[in-house]
Amino acid sequence: MITLIFSIAAYIAVWAINRTIANSPDRDDRAARIFVPVMLGLASLYLWEGLVTGLGVSPVILPAPSDIATTFAASTGILWQDFVQTVLKGALTGYVMGCGAAFLIAILIDRSSFLTRGLLPIGNFVAALPIVGIAPILVSWFGFDWHSKAAVVVVMVFFPVLVNTVQGLRETDAMQRDLMRTYAAGYMQTLLKLRLPAAMPFIFNGLKIASTLALIGAIVAEYFGSPTRGMGFRISTGVGSLSIDLVWAEIVVAAIVGTLLYGSVSWIEKAVTFWHPSQRR
Amino acid sequence: MKNAFPVLVVLAAIVGLWYLAVAPMNIRTALDQAERAGAVIQPEGGRARLEVSVWRLMATNSEHISAGYDLERPRLPTPAQVGRELWKTTGEMALRGKAMSKRSLIYHASVTLKSTLWGFLLGTFLGIAGAVAIVHSRVMDMSVMPWAIISQTIPIVALAPMIIVLSSQLGIEDRGVPKAIISAYLCYFPVLVGMVKGLRAPSSSQLDLLRTYSASQWETFVKLRLPASVPYLFTSLKIGIASALVGTIVGELPTGAISGLGARILIGDQFGTPLAIWAALFAAAMLAGILVTLLDFAQRITLKRMGLEA
């Protein structure tokens, strides 16, 4: 009970500290901008711990963060094996293949304005569809191993990247293209020096959307059949056998991987599109 | 409407490619069936045929290709088969007055729709409330916004089974509730981001003008920020409802749900009836299309009446 009261008090105290920082003149400082959300995260974890231990919630329903951390440390072997199967083999392979194919096809389509006008509305529509549903079909086509997971990821990431790339390639205005023509630049030169750089903010927008979709696709596909490893397999069997703490450890892995994947795409974006107004400081 | 012709041509090309793909996809199943019916196939036996490429099989057994277009359990059904299955489970059942029977896709779509709409309402409410708090409070902006972004990088499918376990342990009987929570989780983020952008859209000169009128914060909100955010709101609502539908179907897939379009896909997979999966997929696509189109209409009408016609 004391933990509960103490954790609630800590939570309120963190909000008060954050409030002071946010209203102080140093609020735009880099350290402050990292400190505030991190403190809130830690306080929320502690509140979770306090609620679970203080109210005596059964670990079968919701384990405390400390229990999850213990399980995480104890089963790194399993978690690593699942990580390799789902993320490295399934999600990343599919991500690279899907994004690469979408990028190349977008450049090909872009040469014909007829195809662009025909495919953009369809691509936009398909990108909004619940494509995860094709997972069982692709699992039955490509078998239980990681190939079917990669295939699901390819289909899921393809359309957002395609649509964004095609849209980005149309971003240059007539004035800029005319300038290239006065330089006597050919198609390739215009593409490489003007249109692709101008399209980069759009392409990265698509890549960022795709990075979260890739993990979703790889995990869902494992619910429909997989070898006896993989994050989706562990989660679905863990729920059945009530090893909930292992399931939460997998969720932690998924959260870290998702954040890292998104973070590294944004980091590359920052380096590539440093000239864009949204990146300026 | 100048895009209608190119779109139709591209659609026709896709259907054409689909029909072409059916032959190589289904040739093995078609040959197995023909062999069981007594026909002589080169090479003999399903196992021996696995060694040979589908193109060779099609060349040596060309008279059996057409059988691949009319299988009961095809690997890849033809568009016509999917259309027939879709009509059989929707229109035909509705005509016989059984629109709400358990075998009808209309019934399953309505189950999915209900969870989607609840999730959409909850997600939109959370998104707008969060945006209002973030725009008006610097603490919220600094501490909550980073976590909102991180929450979207966590694959919801990993959390979905836990949400379902938790809500059943807490004694929530209705199977729609966890699905609605999952779809709200996917739906709130686009609304939050769009509304933060929208509520911050008024320029500082507009805000200064209201200050010279000595308008209170509430008046500034109602008379300037809220109207300025409406175009952003509708754009993000369209993304939000599509995400909400994805969330509901993801919530139905891994959890052994018995009704809903996701459950139809799941059951189709377990019973080996690909036509049911394809029909459910197309029903989900149509549902998404209808929902987004409805919001698009609402957007046009509202913006027109506000004088913001694009």
Image (cartoon, rainbow, N blue to C red):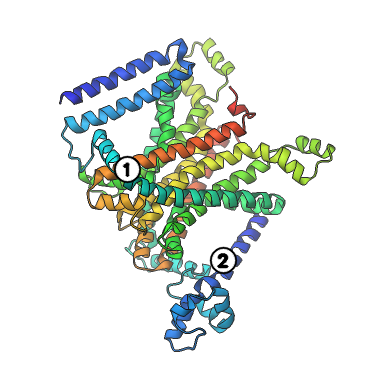
Q: Position of residue B8 (x, y in %)?
A: 63, 59
Q: Residue A163 vs residue B139: left or right?
A: right
Secondary-structure class at tag 1: helix
Mark in the foreground, 2 or 1: 1
SS assignment at label 2: helix
Q: Residue at x 47, y 37 (%)?
A: B190
Outermost residue toward the front in this view: A77
Image spot of residue A172 (x, y percent):
71, 38
Dot 1 crowding, Cα within 10 Å, few <14, some 14–19, many 20+: few
For disc 2, the chain is B
Percent across and percent down for residue B100 are 34, 61
B200 and A232: which one is in front?
A232
Residue A239 visible to an observer of this rendering: yes
Which residue is at 59% across, 62% downward?
B14
- The answer to whether residue B283 of the structure is visible from this angle is no
- Quarter of the picture containing the C terminus of chain A is top right
In which quadrant of the rendered view does residue A68 lie? top left
Q: Amino acid at mark 2?
A: Trp
Q: On residue A76, which mark appears?
A: 1
The answer to whether B39 appears left or right of A198 in the picture is: left
Q: Is residue A96 above or below residue B76?
A: above
- Amino acid at circle 1: Thr
- The picture quadrant where one finds residue A275 is top right
Residue lying at 55% horizontally and 32% vertically, measured from the top left: B306
Mark 2 vs 1: CB contact within 8 A: no
Label 2, residues with CA under 10 Å away: few <14, some 14-19, many ≥20:
some
Q: Where residue B18 is drawn, which disc sits there?
A: 2
Image disc number at residue A87: none
